[in-house]
Image (spheres, rainbow, N blue to C red):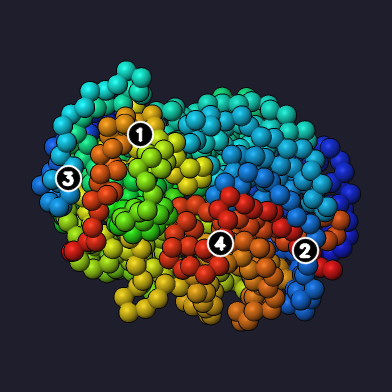
Amino acid sequence: MKLNWNSLLNRKISALLPLILATSLTVSATPARAEQPAAPAGQIDVPQLFATTCGWCHSDGGRAAGKGPQLMDTKRDDDFIRNRIKNGKSGAMPAFGATFDDAQIDEIIKYIRALKPDQG
Amino acid sequence: MRKQWRQSSFYIATIAALAASPAFAQGVDTARIDAGGQNDWLTYHGSYRSYHYSPLAQINPGNVANLNVAWIHIPGRSTRGLQSMPLVADGVLYYTGSYSRTFALNGATGEVIWSYFPELDEGLIARQTHSPYNRGVAIGEGKVYVGTMDGRLIALDMKTGKVMWDTKLIDSQKLTVGFTGAPLYAKGTIVIGAQGGEWPGRGPIFGVDAASGKKKWEFLTVAGTDEAMKTWGNDSWRTGGGGGWMPGTYDSETNTILWGTANPAPLYDWSGSDYKTQGARPGDNLYTSSVIGLDVDSGKLKFYHQELPHDTWDFDSAVGEFVMLDRDGQKYVVHPNKSGYIFVYDRNLGLKNVWRITQNSNFVKNIDPKTGELIGRRDFSAGKVAEPLCPHISGGVSWNAGSYDPKTGLYYKLGQEWCMTLDIVKTTPIVAPQAQLNIGADFKIAPPPGGQIYGHLDARDPITGAKKWEVRFPEPPLASVLSTGGGLVFVPDSRGTLHAYDAESGTELWNHGDGTGHQGGIISYGVNGKQYIAVVAGFGGMASDDYAPTFGGVYKSMPRDDGALIVYSLK
């Protein structure tokens, strides 16, 4: 089965996800804004997103430095992170501004802020 | 005594004289590449035999101490460093930088003859992960061929750099992937494989008419035949990954393109041991993580061997080396894959032997050297994987090439010792609005059990794997290896030092700093009777980006947007 962003992002957080993060990432659906890219609105499964795409560079779900920086305990403010997700960094990070709307990026930021050391 | 003739000064002078002839300069064809050249480097792997070996012997153990920089070229805009394998024909060096910047340089002086910077879809490239590096060109029929990250194959006039044709092959806006690997010229056809692996596509390999730029054929590495379609359960072939992102070679005796294919997507499956019926992509997933033989004219599959059925470790077979050598009347092909296992075949890809170059490997207990069966394979279920997986996702060997020296009979190949933690997570392929990576896990680099990460240069028998000597490096070198008729083996390491070793003993004879890490090609060629060593330096990319956080030290300040072509000769 193949899905588009809509179907991924509208999926409910699965039982596989760490409980500590699940509560912080369950947010209400947000209508798409007209001025924003044609990205889907709604609940975003950020842990799955990291295991799908982001984790190639942000190791261990963002808990450790890898090709990209460690995101857990980052000192960067929300505006910096939002801008980096939207516009990327040449040669280092792809731009996802055409993929996520502001509400979805906010969910990613929430996930990053909630990251804790892996207890497993 | 063809060999003696080729090593004579008269031969060199003859070639130099011929180099001035435009007719000769346009005379790169299949026969010439097949024969290999004393002074040239006509295809990515040196010649179709893929030795990454130069017969030139002017530089040797007795004088290598006098090796010095002859000239340097800066391509500019080297985002993620330089990964290109230069080519040389008739004294002219052709190579690429990031963004498919293409140069023709005077091989003796470095003077720019022409340059070509394609206009690319920069918005697309900004959304790509495995980008914008480029690994080189092909030459033939008076043209230079280069692929682009936005899915095109471009032919340039070899003398002027003028665009002869520009063919769009992939809808990169939708599929995200493009071309980073060098094309291969053979018998009037340009073959180039798409990126793939972790992207939810079907991993095409293309054959394009060298004269017109018209697409002749397309082979899908994911379910490209009816037989293969049956090896993808639940319609998983639609997003299967695959691809063939490094150039293979051409066997003129059988008119066959030999190519290695990439892994299936998602990289890591949660099937557990019943991978034939369970998980993200039930079945063997043909023709991913395989070596395939395609008819050069039609692209029709002639034979194949799937090295890793249902690869669930991202240890694809896309490494492009197919070392063709003869021993005791038997014709062999030696092909490494990313797992660190080296496969030995006959020319029809019938398996003859399998050996391993890495010390730390646990994705299988072994691979049966007679049947190729993966014995004791580790198939994961969702959740944390208890024991780290070895090798690391960057592989037991790099996509860069080793070198076979027909004089010593040894295969010089780099091995990489590293592992990774894994937490397998069920994912769903994302194909709209633009395809995204499909990993299937969170992971982190880890040292081998009870030890440290390291790399090693091995001198081995290519058929049996018997080791003659080994040199260790504190961090895995990622670049290609070069051996020469002068009895030398050159290794460009990750810290930025180029080493020369005695081919028989492994004794280091010379080294020189290139200012930044290596992760690309190295060749040797001759112009006007003088031997040159050309190496690209410039760090950054999918493997090397891990070095600063993992090793610190010199990597912390090493740029990932810089690079140079550095050319050496004797003083």
The residue carrying mark 3 is: A24
* Between discs 2 and 1, the one toward the N terminus: 2
Q: What element carries label 1?
A: loop
* Between discs 4 and 2, the one toward the N terminus: 2
Q: Do the residues labelled 1 and 4 touch (CB within 8 Å)?
A: no
| Gap in angstroms between the C-alphas marked 2 and 3 | 58 Å
The residue carrying mark 1 is: B435
* Mark 4: amino acid: Ser
Q: Nearer the viewer, residue B134 or B191?
A: B134
Residue A10 horizontal/vertical position (percent): 18, 32
In this rendering, position of residue A86 left or right of residue B148: left
In the displayed structure, B517 sits above or below B438; it is below
Disc 3: host chain: A
Disc 4: host chain: B
Residue at figure coordinates x 39%, y 57% from the top left: A66
* Mark 1: amino acid: Ala
Residue at figure coordinates x 51%, y 77% from the top left: B472
Q: How crowded is mark 2: few (under 14 residues within 10 Å), some or many (20 or more)?
A: some
In this rendering, position of residue A107 left or right of residue B448: left
Q: What element carries label 2?
A: strand
Q: What element carries label 3?
A: helix
Q: How crowded is mark 4: few (under 14 residues within 10 Å), some or many (20 or more)?
A: few
Disc 1: host chain: B
| Gap in angstroms between the C-alphas marked 4 and 3 | 37 Å
* Mark 2: amino acid: Val
The residue carrying mark 4 is: B557
Q: Which of marks 2 and 3 is in front?
A: 3
Residue B27 horizontal/vertical position (percent): 75, 40
* Residue situated furthest top in the rendering: A34
Mark on residue B69? 2
